[in-house]
């Protein structure tokens, strides 16, 4: 995984250092060294350990010193019903999935895009949102009228994310269609750094989920402009270690109840401006 340090602002480098510290205890551990607690073990201990991201609007972020956003609102629903306590660590994205696969956390309560690669090591709850990867560009930028115009451009994306995979697949499609392909893919530790570089012209576009780029454009319509889709629709869910079926079933039951009574759709409209009522009940 390559990070272009020359394009990252200084505070981003401090974030990289923090992520390195968080990941250090995991570096020498294989998946077989530890295992996330199953539902019975969680009930027995009285505590479930989860990780949420620190800066991924509108899913998870810190506001006035407290966790906020869509995922945190759903997590509160689980807390209300769960017969155990939920201990929450708020950390950068880079440490979340490794923390789940090595057993440091029982569940990643964050916007994990489901894909076949992740299904090899992770099990997913019922979907919490639907998304498609879109590009966003600087307001009034010349030379990008459609997704095909990303050929020859510099595009930012979060390192290790499903959106990176989507962008790489789209790049291959551009080349297969006879285009030059994306000139340079710049991988960032988090999206705020990517958006900052886009705003000052260091990149031509940034790829993220439609939910996130729409929220960005709504927040800063004089700075950013929404582009087009670069992927097919995908689903977003919370993740635990593969094989942890009872925990998936329990958390999914709470999420499905929130769909049944309309609470989840109300939260989606609040945080995303749209609801996703055609999602499947389970990830296959």
Image (cartoon, rainbow, N blue to C red):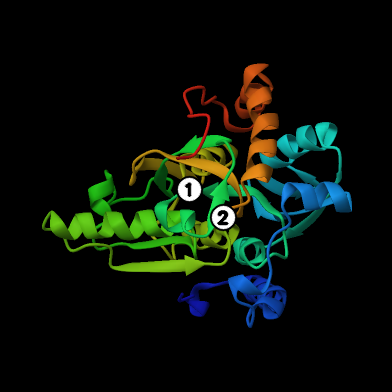
Does 230 appear above or below 187? Answer: above
Does 137 appear above or below 14? Answer: above
Does 269 appear above or below 42? Answer: above
Badge 2 is on which residue? 242
Residue 234, percent across and down?
42, 41
Q: In which quarter of the image is residue 251?
A: top right
Badge 1 is on which residue? 114
Residue 237, percent across and down?
57, 43
Residue 190, percent across and down?
58, 61
Q: Residue 263 versus residue 119: which sits nearer the camera?
A: 119
- Give the residue displayed 46% in from the left and 67% down from the top: 187
How many marks the image carries: the answer is: 2
Residue 213 horizontal side relative to residue 76, left or right: left
Residue 12 horizontal side relative to residue 65, left or right: left
- Number of other residues with Cα within 10 Å of mark 2, as a class: few under 14, some 14 to 19, many 20 or more: some
Earlier sequence position, callout 1 versus callout 2: 1
Can residue 218 be seen in the rendering of this structure?
yes
SS under mark 1:
loop
Q: Quadrant of the C terminus?
A: top left
Q: Specify the farthest residue to the top.
A: 261
SS under mark 2:
loop
- Give the residue displayed 65% in from the left and 68% down from the top: 102
- Give the residue displayed 61% in from the left and 72% down from the top: 32
Find residue 157 and name its label: none
- Number of other residues with Cα within 10 Å of mark 1, as a class: few under 14, some 14 to 19, many 20 or more: many
Residue 133 horizontal side relative to residue 101, left or right: left
Residue 149, percent across and down?
24, 52
1 vs 2, front mark: 2
Residue 3 horizontal side relative to residue 245, left or right: left
């Amino acid at each position: 995984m390559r990070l272009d340090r020359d394009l990252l602002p200084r505070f981003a480098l401090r974030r990289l250092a923090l992520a390195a510290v968080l990941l250090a205890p995991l570096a020498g551990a294989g998946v077989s060294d530890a295992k996330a607690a199953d539902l019975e073990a969680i009930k027995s201990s009285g505590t479930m350990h989860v990780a949420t991201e620190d800066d991924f609007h509108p899913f998870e972020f810190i506001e006035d010193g407290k966790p906020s956003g869509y995922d945190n609102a759903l997590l509160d629903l689980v807390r209300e019903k769960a017969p155990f306590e939920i201990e929450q660590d708020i950390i950068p994205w880079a440490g979340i999935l490794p923390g789940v696969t090595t057993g440091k956390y029982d569940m990643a309560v964050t916007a994990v895009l489901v894909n076949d690669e992740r299904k090899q090591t992770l099990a997913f709850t019922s979907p919490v949102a639907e998304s498609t990867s879109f590009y966003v560009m600087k307001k009034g930028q010349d030379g990008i009228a459609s997704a095909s115009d990303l050929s020859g451009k510099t595009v930012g994306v979060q390192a290790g994310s499903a959106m990176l995979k989507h962008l790489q697949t789209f790049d291959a499609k551009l080349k297969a269609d006879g285009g030059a392909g994306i000139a340079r893919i710049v991988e960032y530790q988090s999206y705020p750094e990517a958006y900052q570089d886009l705003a000052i012209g260091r990149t031509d576009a940034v790829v993220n989920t439609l939910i996130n780029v729409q929220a960005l454009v709504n927040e800063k319509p004089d700075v950013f402009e929404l582009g087009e889709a670069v992927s097919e629709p995908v689903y977003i869910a919370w993740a635990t270690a593969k094989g942890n079926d009872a925990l998936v079933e329990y958390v999914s039951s709470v999420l499905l109840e929130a769909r049944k009574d309309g609470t989840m759709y109300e939260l989606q409209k609040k945080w995303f401006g749209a609801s996703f009522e055609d999602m499947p009940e389970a990830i296959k």
